[in-house]
Image (tube, rainbow, N blue to C red):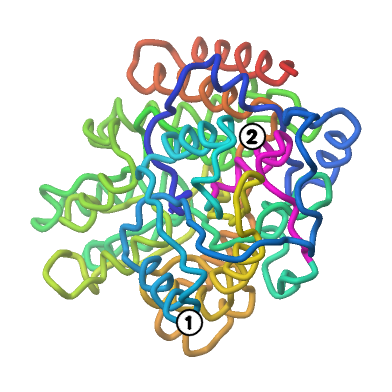
Amino acid sequence: MVSSSHTSRRRAGSRAATKAATVGRRPAWAVAVVAASLATTLVGCGGDSSEPAADSPGKFSGRGPITLATGKDTTGTIQEQLDRWNSEHPNEKVTLVELPESADQQRQQFIQNAQTKSDAYTVLNLDPIWVAEFAANQWIDELPAGQFPLDKMLPAVVMTGEYFGKQYAIPYNTNAGLLFYRQDLLDKAGVQPPTTWDDMKDACAAVAKLPEGKDVDCYAGQFDKYEGLTVNFSEAVASAGGTVVDAEGRATVDTEEAKKGLQFLTDGFKDGTFPEEASTYQEEDGRRAFQAGKLLFHRQWPYQWALANAKDGSSKVAGKFGVAPLPGLDGPGKSSLGGLDLAVSKFAKNKATALDFIKFFSSEANARTNLKVNSAAPPYAGLYDDPALRRQFPYLATLKESLSGAVPRPVVVQYGDATAAIQESAAAALSGSKSVDAALADMQRDLSAAIAEK
């Protein structure tokens, strides 16, 4: 989940608060030239210079009770792991602080806690997109990278926790978007899982002719005006061969590729490929629709696998669906990179305990458990090739493929303002209040302004 691990609800707080809070942006994990460009142009600001320096890597001090601040634990697995830690560390217990499901609201609360220099949150479970912002503001401590098995993790995922070559966060899980589809209905219609957007529309038309397909809508993603819309828009642009921000850090939504990506989304609502109610869908809304048998295709994070396969009667599609890479304009599309990264608050107490807890919580054993219990995408490369896990989760090869080609959300200095600009214009196009051309022109202007802010 994004970040839920999956992304959630709409951006909280004023634009002014965001501008004051967001002062840094990490280099893109997949584009070395971006890293070089940012390293020469960005200056991490924030943090009162009168404050004492954070504990240096490997010298975290203080032991005792701590807290873990994270998005709502919808699976129950987090608390189970905390219970295990607490039983083994009775004098260093971890208390779970559950923040809203909304990623935007989570970020707001994390920032408020940091700006007040509160010690209420010890370990922060962050959307990777926030790591650079928190590091630049000196809200989180640099971690001793050598004390973690980062060499066993997917390199691209490890880099989500880096800022200017230093490790500020450790991956807890990762994420890539997948196409969930009704295998039973495609088989009955005699069609294969789609690799292009046109293939998907043709498949929907074929299934619609079946008696079983009468009340099944074609496709949904996350189209509410929140971080999920930034993810879905970015994926559509990348899947049409474009970029939202290029390797030089410039806004690039005034291109034909970006237009094709947004046109696919807007046309989907106009021609009925996407049900009208999908304009308000976040992750859980679409998941419930898919599990109820109302969708033929659903763009979703891997966590949906376990829930949709539940045998307790909560899912009407258990054993009836498959997973494929996202489709694109002319072939397989590209996913945005999601996940959750663990960091230590600069203002926390008992940081030695926090460091040990992150080692435990981000371990390969826990990642394996998270995969088995709630199909969370692990950061450890070896788990994707484990024969037993592949038998249990046949989509792992597909997920690994999606992760290998996943792209980060826009790499800009002021990410909060950038995502707001994307959401505003994309939502206007989807609702029909602006044409695709006008929406992209506005987005190009506002995104360029956000990039120019220091």
Instruction: Give the residue drawn at x 65%, y 65%.
Output: 355
SS class of the residue under badge 2?
Answer: loop
Q: In the rendering, at what x and y percent does residue 305 appear?
A: 34, 66
Q: Nearer the viewer, residue 454 or 312?
A: 454
- In the rendered image, which quarter contains the C terminus? top right
The amino acid beneath tag 1 is: Glu
Q: Which residue is the extreme one toward the bottom?
A: 388
In the rendered structure, which segment of residues is drawn in magenta? 126-145
The amino acid beneath tag 2 is: Pro
Q: Nearer the viewer, residue 310 or 108?
A: 108
Instruction: Give the residue drawn at x 50%, y 66%.
Output: 377
Q: For residue 129, what is the image quadrant?
A: top right
Q: In the rendering, at what x and y percent does residue 386 appear?
A: 55, 85
Number of the label disc, if any, that sits on residue 410: 2
Q: Is residue 321 visible?
A: yes
Q: Which residue is the extreme one toward the left?
A: 211
Q: In the rendering, at what x and y percent does residue 284 appear?
A: 29, 48
Query: What residue did someone put label 1 on?
Result: 88
Residue neighbourhood size for the residue with mark 1, other residues' Cα within 10 Å, grouped as few (<14), some (14–19), many (≥20): few
Residue 84 belongs to magenta span? no
Residue neighbourhood size for the residue with mark 2, other residues' Cα within 10 Å, grouped as few (<14), some (14–19), many (≥20): many
SS class of the residue under badge 1?
Answer: helix
Instruction: Give the residue drawn at x 55%, y 55%.
Output: 123
Q: In the rendering, at what x and y percent does residue 26 appear?
A: 73, 40
Alpha carbons under labels 2 and 1: distance apart:
42 Å
Is residue 344 toward the left or the right of residue 428 in the image? right
Instruction: Give the residue drawn at x 52%, y 13%.
Output: 437
Query: Which comes before the other along the chain, label 2 or label 1?
Result: 1
